[in-house]
Image (cartoon, rainbow, N blue to C red):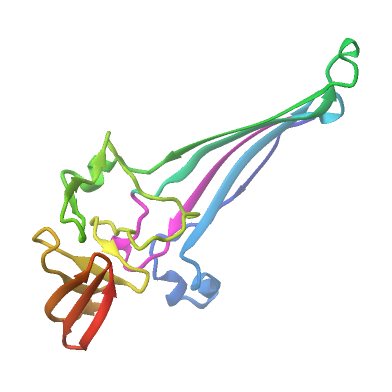
Amino acid sequence: MPISSAVDSRFFSDNLYPFDFEEFSTYRKDRFVESKAFVEKRFGPLDRYALYGAVLYADDLQNPDDQDRDDFLLQRMPQLHASGVPTRLHPALGNLVGSFDADYTRFAALDAGSDVFGDTLFVDPVTGEARPAIVDGSFADVGIDAIPDGQERDSQGRVVRQDGTVLLSSDGGKTFRLKKQAGSKALSAAVRVSDTELLLFGEAGVSRMDL
């Protein structure tokens, strides 16, 4: 059986292209554009066994370009799979059958964490604890399948909420400043009313924000 292979790739050099050109408008609703390349080989009687290898890459379309996660987003490079369908092992073993199914995935970012973040410290807005962004030479970002937990960070290591709000603190979580991706909103005060909630006073009046 010959080796099967395929490449399906999509990349944007500028994250605004889907909004600037009508022919790319189908990608406007996508946070990521995914590419995949794989090779597969089946062998053995009736092709009972298979080996599969792939590289999966996701291009982050967040705007602006300098705040997307391309540098440190975890990619599957490579993803390997081996399998064998159930087969009788040996006549001496009666009806005993055996099969196998194994996967290996190496999650890797394009750049080393130290190249992206250097000596950056993250400040927990609740505890005020400062901790390194880099652990064992790596930045622990999530992949595209992760469930958002409100702690996603931009390329500068700042916490970015799902509505685009950036939560900044320069004094260990005692005071806060909000910043929108497309502008700023002035705050006169931010008072912590619980371990999970802030009371905000500013241009927009009084509001509450979950930490």
Question: Is residue 163 highlighted in magenta?
Answer: no
At 22% from the left and 47% from the top, the residue drawn is 117
Farthest residue toward the top?
Answer: 92
Q: Of residues 189 and 63, which is closer to you in this image?
A: 189
Is 91 positioned to the left or the right of 204 in the image?
Answer: right
Picture quadrant where residue 23 is located:
bottom right
Quarter of the rendering occupied by the N terminus? top right
At which x and y percent is residue 20?
Answer: 43, 76
Foreground of the two, 100 or 205: 205
Q: Which residues are magenta?
A: 50-71
Q: How many marks?
A: 0
Does 87 appear above or below 162? above
Of 159 and 37, nearer the camera is: 159
Residue at the extreme front of the image, as rendered = 194
Residue displayed at 15% across by 75% down: 190
Asked whether 61 falls inside the magenta stretch, the response is: yes
| Residue 75 shown left or right of residue 126 in the figure | right
In this picture, is 156 found above or below 119? below
Residue 102 in percent (x, y) is at 63, 31
